[in-house]
Amino acid sequence: MGGPVARSTGSVPFDADRDVPGLIVKFGDYPLHHGGVGAIRSLGRLGIPMYAMTEDRYTPAAASRYLRRAFVWPTTGTEEPERLVEGLLRIGHLIGRPAVLIPTDEEAAVLIAEHQEALADRGRFLFPRVDAKLPRRLASKQGLHELCVEHGIPSPAAAFPQSYDDIVRFAEKARFPLVAKNREAFVRRSRPAVNGTTRIATREGLLTLARDWGDHPGVILQEYLPREEAEDWIVHAYFDADSTPLAMFTGVKVRSWPPHAGMTANAYVVDNPELADLAARFIKQIGFSGVIDLDLRFDRRDGQYKLLDFNPRMGAQFRLFENESGVDVVRAMHLDLTGRTVPEGEQRAGHRYIVENIDLPALLAYRRSGYTTPHAPARASGTELAWLAGDDLRPFFTMLARFVRPGAKHLYQLWRTNRRGGTNSSTAK
């Protein structure tokens, strides 16, 4: 059964190609992903048919009124790439016409880049063409650091130990505290060395942790940028085949979860031409094409914006950003890949984005630490909620049901089974 006829929630001065659908591509088990829901809504409101890969039939994405069809395909990210490509091609066959691929994680972005020819064969899928090796290198902490050094882009000082003995030698000269991160960003690592970003206060603490990292520690040991002397900034953009920005946005991260090191929970749009120029110059130098999500930290001690993370795909909080013409990075990509002009316009300065299920614990944690974010406006010019939307309520309630499981999940499934209408699901194995 097809979904409802999509309607726009606001006037946009452009006409999207409604004959070319979009497909949300995700690998791994993370059903509460607001970015995918945002992309479904963003294009769906323009009347573009939307499809998505989902873990099961009861994810927020599958519940969206703007989703034409959910392809239930549980994955872990550890599958052989050939199997994932085959599954994608089967989904393309079921869709029955060329579709724009919208990756929501590094695994998906890397897979698409490394198997471009197979996925683009006979026009099955549309996506930005890029050097096949570049997304994997950008998603790697070591690869990104090396690219920053090569092109003169500031980044935190870092070391990449190859053995425990390397760590012992590093610890003798290191300045503490420092930060340890997994060298590769992919969730497919079966036994990550550390759980996310880990602050290490002393030499003894480092050596104790390192004993569990094995003979070949897959970590990066990075300079710690104290939050008291830093500001967290984000850049979202879409670059065309010539690495020219067709949509570029900058903002300030107010809160994240886990605190100071995790996913954006609250952010504002703040104009920052210097940061936009830095990002555009780097993208031009490396020749990237597509959507980007960058995390940078401004170090007040030396006045530099230091690049921390480069996500070569749509960021979960991309709906924070939209220009005066109604263009966000996902809309810009769809317009460009379908031969449409991407309208220009200033970004909505002062606009705020809130992820409801993680911003409350983040707020409490930040208040306890006494940390405040410079440059965040005292009052928002408007607010975009990650989950709650008046024209698409089901994803919000689905999120709540899964967020407070198991009791609420069971009640939701009973309600979902008996509710009227719904989205179709099929299995792509």
Image: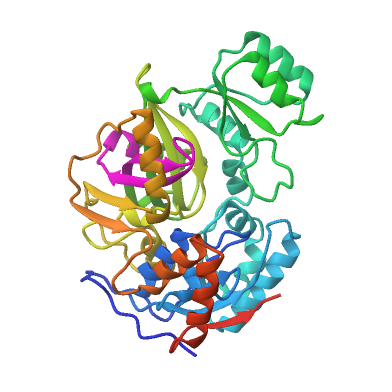
Q: Residue furthest right?
A: 215
Q: Residue furthest top?
A: 172
- Image position of 201 (left or right of 421): right
Q: Which residue is at the front of the view, 421 or 166?
A: 421
Q: Vertical placement of 271 versus 129: above or below?
A: above
Q: Which residue is at the front of the view, 49 or 36?
A: 36
User: Which stretch appears magenta?
Assistant: 250-276
The verdict on residue 274 being magenta is yes
- Image position of 417 (left or right of 12): right
The verdict on residue 417 being magenta is no
Q: Vertical placement of 417 versus 376: above or below?
A: below
Residue at 49% of width from left, 75% of height from top? 412
Residue at 74% of width from left, 18% of height from top? 166
x then y, percent, for residue 211: 77, 25
Query: Can residue 161 be seen in this snapshot?
Result: no
x then y, percent, for residue 317: 40, 53
Quadrant where the C terminus lies?
bottom right
x then y, percent, for residue 356: 37, 55
Report which quarter residue 75 is drawn in: bottom right
Residue at 25% of width from left, 72% of height from top? 9
Report which quarter residue 260 is drawn in: top left
